[in-house]
Amino acid sequence: MLLALVFGIFLVLIGVTASALVAVASDHISRTTVAATVSRDRDLIEFFVDGNLRASDLSAAGPTRQRANELRRQMETLASDDGITAIALRNRQGEIVVAGGPEVGELPIAGDDPQVVVALGGELLAELTSGSDSVVDALEEQLPIMSDGEVLGVVSLRRDASELLAGLDAARRDVMIVTLAAALILAAILYFVFRAAQARLTRQQTQLVEATRRDALTGMLNHGAVVGLLADAVDEGRGKGRLITVALVDVDNFRLFNDTHGHEAGDDVLVLVAGLVSDLEMAGAYAARYGPDEFILVYPDSPLADVQRRARTLQESMREVALRFRTSDEELPVSVSVGIAAFPEHAASVTDLLSEASVALAEAKASGGDSVIVASRDDREKVTAGSFDVLQGLVIAVDTKDRYTKRHSEDVARYAVFLARQLGLDDEMLDMIHLCGLLHDIGKIGIPDALLRKPGKLTANEFRVFQQHVALGEAIVRDVPRVDLVRSGIKHHHERWDGKGYLEGLEGEGIPVIGRLLAVADAFSAMTTTRPYRKALSIAEALKRLGDAAGTQLQEELVTCFITGIETSADAPLPGDKATGLWRLTRQVA
């Protein structure tokens, strides 16, 4: 659209410029050509007058018949040799004394014609005239005959203008051709410049979007990207009997290795393992970095035995690898442990599937490492508390990724529960609100560290990527039983009362209550916590700004209730006060 707009403006400018150039060039060439023609005719007439004309020829009596015929023959000869179609000799009264040429009838007859009168005043005149069809076809000239500053008479000329006009048309055509040629060249340059710029912008945007899905060190899919893909695969496979198998791969004793030999050595190990894990990918399967020293392989439509075989192949490949670093004179072995689980055999949801694989991985590591364990096949019932244990693990994962997000989530949970109590909500609702507060930013595990910790304002593209954490958070918890209210809070806590929030742009009471309530707690926590791009505000300043946001970003009634409670309640939670209003994450929802 931008290219089309620029091209449209460009074409208009070229059209205006070309028209102006043609008009200016035509006028200039016309004036120059007419001036040159008139100058030549004036010299010609002066030569004629000096060599042939007598004073008696312009007297009141005029020339004799014989003399008139002689002058006429001389003028017709002059006209035939120089392209003049009509010529007339006038006395000082403007009356024609003698005339000749095929178009003499086109000349002014009366002596009081305005052009003749002006010429009798001593001024030379030249004018392009039109015929009956309004087409310029002749150049008419009035040339005064002067002697000692006195006008003795006038010579009227009419010249065929076709040759002159042909020259003008050729000049116009040449100007237009040159202008259009330049326009075409500029248009081509502009097109290629825009296309190159658009290709570069598209490439950069693709790289930025892809960077949000990739781990910076290994280049593999990151945690958030693989969880989203796995959730989609489980949704697609549910009800179709499709088998989806996951394998969690953990580097044995990585922390000890990292601490002993340094982070650079640790990164080398991770890159090595990542390459070997990626070698196990197949059509339809994908590998990703799942944690600091963990990787995940997802295999749709692959039986457990096949995945076990691939895991053992990975272990055998690891046994053939030995690393040597400056801090050690020995070649160091690297091994991995693998936990495997399958949907729907071991779990009915994404969170349970990952939980089962994590349990199997823990068993593999507990057995001494360098082993492969498949999840248990018993059909024991998964209780709600167990599901919450999985969510608690996800919160811990957030803490590992970004301590600010963990602390912020705890504060939001405290503030949200406090506000809910001020509103008189029941205990079951308080449980849900507290849980939602702890998990409202769980989707940030899929956001690149460069965005979460950027010490400055995010760009428009970066902010669009950041906004996706609410959708990712909802996707992570969507299969946990009986937490629809929590999902709603996670998804909608960044909607605004005035409809300018994200992701869905809901407005007013169209925003779920839990989303509106969390928005107040989230805003207060964000302002009273030191962040990478600014220090924490004082409580007084934060409450003032919270009040300023009432009715636009936040619901006014909830803001008023929260501010009143903070200012007047003895048990009001304050920044850093984690003892007030704490609720346990593992508290079961009835």
Image (spheres, rainbow, N blue to C red):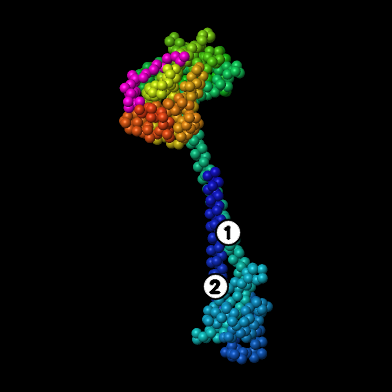
Q: Is residue 337 magenta?
A: no
Query: In which quadrant is the N terminus drawn?
Result: top right
Q: Is residue 418 left or right of residue 225?
A: left
Q: Which residue is mark 2?
A: 35
Majority SS type along the magenta span = loop
* Rendering coords of residue 463 (x, y %): 45, 33
Q: Residues within 10 Å of mark 2 (few under 14, many from 20)?
A: few
Q: Residue at left 38%, top 30%?
A: 560
Q: Residues within 10 Å of mark 1 (few under 14, many from 20)?
A: some
* Rendering coords of residue 437 (x, y %): 42, 23
Give the answer, above or below, for where 175 lies relative to 264: below
Q: Nearer the viewer, residue 442 or 328?
A: 442
Q: Nearer the viewer, residue 133 or 289?
A: 133
Q: Residue at left 57%, top 55%?
A: 181
Q: Which mark is residue 176?
A: 1
- Callout 2: helix, strand or loop? helix
Q: Is residue 326 left or right of residue 241?
A: left
Q: Nearer the viewer, residue 303 or 579?
A: 579
* Rendering coords of residue 568 (x, y %): 32, 25
Q: Amino acid at mark 1?
A: Met
Give the extent of the magenta segment.
Answer: 565-590
Q: Residue at left 48%, top 22%?
A: 485
Q: Is residue 518 visible?
A: yes
Please tell me which of labels 1 and 2 falls first in the chain: 2
Residue ranking furthest to the right: 102
